[in-house]
């Protein structure tokens, strides 16, 4: 199969073009056309000589994830069901019965002055958080850097006419980003590169369930996004019950890694806390959270549980407010975040739709 250029770094594209007998700067031109200008057709790369465009067309390819369904929420959120290129090709090439293509999900949330794109880093997830539907899939496979960057490019391109000046990207879709470290970092370098997709590190957030070695490794990176940690409990006993990963990386180790995480002057760690009614939403829980997060420069997002297929209750409004007040009184910036797109299963913890996806996008536009 021809070489897919999507996901290649500037250095890799320069090396590839040099290998083809072209000046290396042609690689930088392809890089810019692909990620900064979002030109996915060699014919549209008008800064390249016609003979080179022709040769790139013959010898390489640019393969984006393909949209097979769009679910539009009443709040403007759009959930895309995407089929991965390699699987499309495999299913096209396979003898009957064709292999069911693998799908992932990407969520686009428009706001007044910006848009936020929530992307996946794995198909399914092995971490097994008990409040998350993705966990029910298990890990199917890691995404490549191209498939991760491709989700952002597809969502931007789909909404090109209505884009606001600021784009936020959150790595909070399917998968644990720090368990697909190399591909995620390769994608982030392209997303955060001024000559690439050119997002600001202030607007890109990686969310982890608390993979301590991954946090420690991320701390050493020159280019890195903001970091969010999915806390969700105020004691090891409680966290063990909903996040088995806590047995491997208990709260003391996790908080120690957080305290040593080298924050930039403008930066705070984010702790996400899904409030599960009757489980982790009492004032005592809030006071334990205050103690746990002492000496960490952070903010806290409280996420009331989304009613769904899993056996938890949404917290009541008084409990949410009491929890928020206890943290706020102790000086924590604390926000209650109601998930968007609940009516289309696009909210936090709801991304788990693996369904038979047609490879003909137009036939499945559900808007
Ligand atoms: S919450 Fe995140 S880390 Fe936990 S199972 Fe779901 S996708 Fe995986």
Image: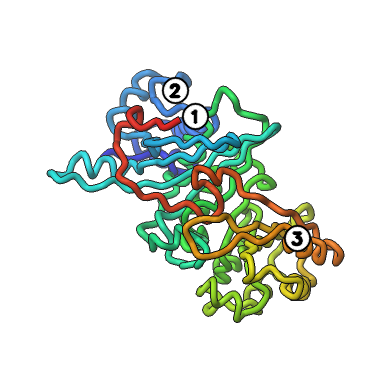
**Residue 129 position (above or below residue 107):** below
Q: Nearer the viewer, mark 1 or mark 2?
A: 1
Label disc, if present, on residue 158 of the rendered structure: 1
- Cβ–Cβ under 8 Å for marks 2 and 3: no
**Residue 122 position (above or below residue 364):** below
Disc 3 crowd rating (10 Å Cα; few below 14, some 14-19, many 20+) is few
- State the residue position of label 2: 45
Dot placed on the residue nearer the N-terminal end, 1 or 2: 2
Q: Nearer the viewer, mark 1 or mark 3?
A: 3
Label disc, if present, on residue 208 of the rendered structure: none
Disc 1 crowd rating (10 Å Cα; few below 14, some 14-19, many 20+) is few
Give the image quarter of residue 3. Answer: top left
Q: Nearer the viewer, mark 2 or mark 3?
A: 3
Secondary structure found at label 3: helix
Secondary structure found at label 2: loop
Give the image quarter of residue 258. Answer: bottom right
Left or right side of 231 for 126: left
The front one of 23 and 362 is: 362
Indicate the position of residue 319 as horizontal and vertical percent values: 73, 63
- State the residue position of label 3: 318
Q: Please tell me which residue is depicted at 30% across the width and 31% down the height of the picture.
A: 360
Give the image quarter of residue 274. Answer: bottom right
């Amino acid at each position: 199969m021809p070489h897919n250029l999507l996901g290649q770094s500037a250095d890799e594209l320069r090396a590839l073009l040099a290998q083809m007998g072209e000046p290396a700067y042609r690689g930088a031109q392809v890089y810019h056309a692909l990620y900064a200008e979002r030109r996915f057709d060699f014919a549209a790369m008008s800064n390249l000589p016609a003979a080179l465009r022709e040769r790139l067309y013959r010898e390489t390819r640019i393969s984006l994830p393909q949209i097979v369904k769009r679910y539009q929420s009443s709040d403007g959120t759009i959930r895309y069901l995407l089929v991965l290129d390699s699987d499309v090709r495999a299913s096209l090439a396979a003898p009957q019965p064709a292999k069911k293509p693998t799908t992932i999900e990407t969520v686009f949330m428009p706001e007044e002055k910006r848009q936020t794109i929530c992307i996946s880093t794995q198909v399914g997830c092995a971490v097994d958080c008990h409040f998350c539907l993705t966990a029910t899939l298990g890990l199917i496979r890691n995404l490549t850097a191209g498939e991760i960057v491709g989700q952002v490019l597809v969502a931007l391109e789909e909404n090109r006419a209505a884009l606001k000046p600021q784009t936020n990207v959150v790595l909070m879709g399917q998968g644990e980003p720090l368990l697909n470290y190399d591909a995620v970092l390769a994608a982030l370098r392209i997303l955060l590169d001024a000559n690439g997709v050119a997002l600001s590190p202030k607007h890109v957030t990686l969310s982890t369930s608390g993979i301590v070695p991954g946090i420690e490794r991320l701390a050493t990176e020159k280019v890195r996004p903001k970091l969010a940690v999915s806390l969700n409990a105020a004691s090891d006993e409680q966290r063990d019950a909903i996040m088995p990963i806590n047995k491997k990386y208990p709260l003391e180790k996790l908080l120690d890694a957080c305290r040593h995480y080298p924050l930039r002057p403008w930066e705070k760690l984010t702790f996400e806390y899904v409030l599960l009614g009757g489980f982790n939403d009492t004032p005592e829980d809030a006071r334990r959270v205050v103690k746990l997060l002492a000496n960490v420069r952070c903010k806290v997002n409280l996420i009331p549980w989304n009613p769904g297929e899993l056996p938890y209750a949404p917290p009541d409004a008084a409990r949410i407010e009491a929890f928020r007040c206890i943290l706020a009184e102790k000086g924590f910036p604390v926000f209650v975040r109601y998930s968007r797109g609940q009516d289309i299963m696009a909210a936090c913890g709801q991304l788990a739709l693996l369904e038979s996806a047609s490879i003909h996008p137009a036939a499945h536009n559900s808007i």
